[in-house]
Image (spheres, coloured by chain):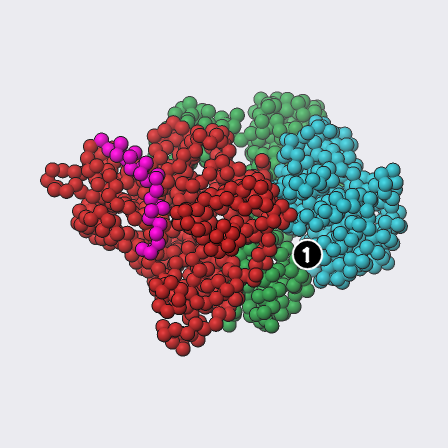
Chain colours: A red, B cyan, C green
Amino acid sequence: MNSYRIKFLPSGAEAQVAAGESLYDAALTLGIQIRGECGGQGSCGQCLVKIEAGDCPPTPHASISPDKERRGYRLACVSRVHDDCVVFVPEESLTPSEGLDFDAVILSEDDRKRERALVGIIPVPPIASSTVPHPPIGFALDLGTTTVVGELVDLGTGRCLARAAAYNRQLSCGADIISRISYAERGKGRDRLRALALETINEIIGRLLNRADVDAGRVLLAAVAGNTTMIFLLLGMDPSSIRRESSDAVRTRYPIIYSREAQLKINPLAPVMFAPGIGSYVGGDVLAGVLACRMHESDKVTLFIDAGTNGEIVLGNRDWMMGCACSTGPAFEGVGIACGMMAAPGAIEAVEIARPNDLPSLTVIGDTQARGICGSGMIDLMAELFRHGILDRNGTLNAGRSARVEEHGGRRAYLVRKKGEEGAAREIYLNDVDFKKLLRTKAAIQAAIRTMLKNVDLEIQAIQRVVIAGRLGEAIDAAKAVSIGMLPDIPPDRFEYIGNGSLWGANLMLLSKEKGVDLNALADRITYLDLSTHPGYMDEYVASLFIPHTDV
Amino acid sequence: MNSSSVRKIRIGNTPADGGTRASSIEVGGESCLPYHQFEGIMPCKPVIAWEIPDVRPDDWCETVKDPYRELLGDPVGWARYVVEKHGARIICLDLRGARLDKENRSAAASVELLRGLLKDVKVPLIIKGPGPGQKQNEVIAACAEAAQGERCLLASAVGEEYKTLVAAAIAYGHLVVAESPIDVNLCKQLNILISDLSFPSDRIVIDPLTGGLGYGLEYTYSVMERIRLQALSGDAMMQMPFINFVGGEVWKAKEVKMPAAKEPMWGNERERGVLWEVATAVSLLYAGAGILVMRHPAAIAVVEKTIENLMKNG
Amino acid sequence: MKLTGLQIFKLLPNKNCKECGFQTCLAFAMKLAAKQAKIDACPYASPEAKETLGAAAAPPIRLVTIGMGERAVRIGEELVMFRHEKAFFHKTALAPQVDDLMGREEILARLREVCAFSVARAGENLLLDLVAIKEKSGAPEKFAQTVKFTAEQCLLPLVLVSKRSACMRAALESVGSSRPLLWGADGNNADEMAALAKEFACPLVIEGEGVEALAQMACRAAEKGVDDLVLCPVSSGAAGRLRDFTLLRRHALSRSLRGSGYPLIMSASSKGYEGAVAAVGGICKYASVIVLEDPAPWTYFPLLTLRQGIYTDPQKPLQVKPGVYIIGDAGGNAPLLVTTNFSLTYFMVSSEVEASEIPSRLLIVDAEGQSVLTAWAAGKFNAEVIAKAVVAQELAASVPHKRIIIPGYVAMISGDLEDKLPGWNVMVGPQESADIPAYLKEVWARATA
């Protein structure tokens, strides 16, 4: 069957799409949720997109004037792919994240563990006082590039009252940090990104208040952890310096401001704290993670990895710490991978292949039909294919090794599921280009770890504890990630998953004031290593573009 | 040879080995840095392969065409001349004429030429294909078959297409040049990938990609030093000898073509050009070159003598 | 012994006071380990730390200066055996030679050649560094006259070559205050030459057979108060020279042989190609000064080009020269692709274009040697940069179809680029170079059909 390359603007995300598939579905596989109340009937007219290049026949609808039609406007849900296209998705056609049912997934078992841990560390109720009838409530926020998660916390007991998550609405302006910065540099881009961030956050706050059944006025303290760019954009600051200045110049310290200035819809006089940044691309979210895993209090040499769109890594212990960022790209979050998706219901999160020709056995989030594959599933798949010799060391599929390797849309692909197999609703595959992207992602992380170790002349075995945070963490199979070289080859009992370290850290900021954790001082203790100008990094990176590594 | 030596490789089969070459050539085998015979052994001296294009090389500059004038369109005669008159020990047949942007000669034409050369000239051969693309695979596969059993060195396995060339070398008993773009890791990766095809490591020669003097020579130089240091510290996937395609890189530079009349400071262009090739080649010798593919007879003579001097125990 | 960053860090106060100019003590420690900072920058370092780190930081090879003023030549202070380990720092100085048996005209002719030589290449003016004057006459007065004459005609620092202390003294009477290099001392005249070097405050070459014996001679000279030494091992042949220079450099860097920590000098005695070949060996392997005894003028440019390459900083990313590269027989209708000047990017793109067998033009823009996405992220590969390159290369004139193909990874700049290049059609190419052949055969062919 033919397939075509579809590119979505403004995010720039691309997918190889089978002929006849709708633009709507194609966008969905990239994590771009286009509106569509009618469920793809071509009736509601909410899914307007603009064809910038390529052929796509008109889709008559009342919402499309003849002039608009001439300018390339189409309904995404009924436009069937039959040519390479560049498709612009207007802001108003994007769905608000309310519709996405991933709160339950994002806030999983780990968070409950975390809650117990939090309760344990609070010696006395910090702000509670007898004069306040109800215990005051705090708002903890993890402001991620892709995902935003918030919690309401009882400041008296430390208990979590409600949690909610949403896609960052800025996604429509670019999938990664650099795209956002460059969007902010154009026209009113900065204003718009700020508005989108606030929309996302305030919508989460609304849901939280609803769920916990409390009044906004009772939320008296907020803590925000996010990467430097996200915080700059939320505060309406110019993010250009982040990518232009030398990294040390962007060791950000934010003042505590009132929520009315921050425009958060909680008590207008509630102080809002921001986790300080360590360097341009190692932000407060990482600092929050360090706080959460308490590596700064431990003698053990700890490697903290937050493998999000931007991979951030901190190495060290109570005596010294070093942090760096590596641009992993959004592949592990499902963006830019033909059948990739976020870790949400329907995503394959684990894969096992018994013999080269066997149908892979899958674990799917939410126990539903598989719709796509998320980061941990991709790592598993790479490891399994490599183990069976189906994937070469340089990330090329080997046609002769498995009957499941086929030509697909002009590329070689491994078919995880053919349509109808085990009742699969759609075909799920990864092609040569996908594997190259995954290889680069794993190489970026591996090279960053190796470069950091070299900088302090430590061997891999010197790492006594590995803490993995972020969405990748929960389902990740450490042994498989080790087998492809993404994680260091050390005994499995040294790995630990803490889930959303950034949110956890934000909680600690709310609750542990009495313990006197001085975040700025903590940030000062972390030495920033700029990989982009580090002479050894490129070498390490090229050496890591090999499974498991050139030197293994 | 111990585990931290460069592998010794042999090019060319004599009748004793089932080929028709009058001699064979060995390179590699050293257990020390280049010419460090005070602390190791260097059993084979580097060799110079004379580059012979299959078609009239109109793009060669005058300085390097001059010594071959009447031979330019006659590759077999040219090869015979360098063997008989200059004692060439190995020839590099460059099948550039098969390139689409040259004469787009067919694989059959390349094979015919090769057969003639094998019959008339009895030194070992390097067969250099027209470069990446479909044509490379056709031409090299056909030539590999035509030269079956002669243990030629096939150039070059490169990029994603390495498998075709390696398959031809396996099928017909040849050696391969593994080419990677001036990078230690990419070099090793390609060697591993080729070895993963069950191709013996003592039939691989590394082309680290050569930059001519003034055009990235120092990058090639350092990459070779790094590869060699790793080889000597026991990294088996780095222990192959080097080949450097010197002539082609040198003689396209403006520095060898510019007449002294236009740039008096640069000096006489003939001698300057020859020295350009010599300086490139000699630097690469210091970095560990095993086979140097060169063009100008005067340059080759100087480099031959330099090799003799460096091989003498000081 | 070389200390690691963490070992140094443990010697520091860990106050993170930033007074050294670095954000943290660890950052400072890593700079110290990389020898990019000095312990003196830390106001709170303990005396023990200063002692330990100060000793470790002293250069293993002495810095020696020849001559005075602007054209003074600095040699030594090298830190590595192989340039990829860090870099070679003080370029090999080339010293064409004249002698006191040459006629004035002959000397003048060579000096003119040498002093006037200047070729601009890759951002540097390639120049010769020194003039050597060899005493062949045995007559102090004659040597002194030649030296005086040469010094008047030529502003380059001098190397005075004589084993006769009387000749050397006579020459130094006229040029002794300009810090020439004295070559020099050997087993017979060491004490007298050392006395001259001390009296006139000049650097001195010590010549001797055998690495250990030579180092001992250097120690004796140093004991006599001559610190600025240059060593010349007397070796047989190219292999012997390589051995002795390598061993001396090794000893110096590992501080395993007292008296070995000085720069090295050699002479290329042959004419023509062979002299040049000897110099090539010296430039590659550890010579700080090479005297060219009978140089041909056409050897200067190749040798200086080699020296420029060997002494560039290898940590700089490997770049290709910005400009338009023609692949195949590309005429006006050939596609025009643009990418960055990172060498790997260039190699990947150009080899795929070659493999497509569609003659094309490749516009390489200066993105400081970074790959497409890295350069874009740092603002070095954007619409402005590309538009500037298109204008600078006057492509509007040579590309009638006015189409430019940008890498798929920077699709987001296509609009900006069209704004900045009015009349041009910006096409978004594939993200992966492997897809270029298919793209050219299908998308490009369709677009231009």
Residue ID at (53%, 37%)? A483
Question: A121 or C155, which is in the foreground?
Answer: A121
When asked about the image quadrant of residue C231, the answer is: top right
Residue range corresponding to the magenta coloring: A97-123
Residue ID at (68%, 54%)? B132
Q: Position of residue C419 (x, y in %)?
A: 45, 68
Quadrant showing the C terminus of chain C: bottom right
Position above or below: B104 against B291: below
Residue C377 in view (yes/no): no
Q: Which residue is mark 1?
A: B133
Q: Is residue A373 left or right of residue A191?
A: right
Tag 1: amino acid: Gly
Could you tell me how many numbered marks the image carries? 1
Position above or below: C362 against B29: below
> Is residue A118 located in the magenta-colored stretch of the structure?
yes
Q: Position of residue A121 (x, y in %)?
A: 26, 32
Q: Chain of mark 1?
A: B
Q: Is residue C271 left or right of residue B216?
A: right
Question: Main structural element of the magenta stretch: helix, strand or loop?
Answer: helix
Residue B168 in view (yes/no): yes
Q: Position of residue B146 (x, y in %)?
A: 82, 51
> Is residue A371 located in the magenta-colored stretch of the structure?
no
Question: B255 or C293, which is in the foreground?
Answer: B255
Q: Secondary structure at mark 1?
A: loop
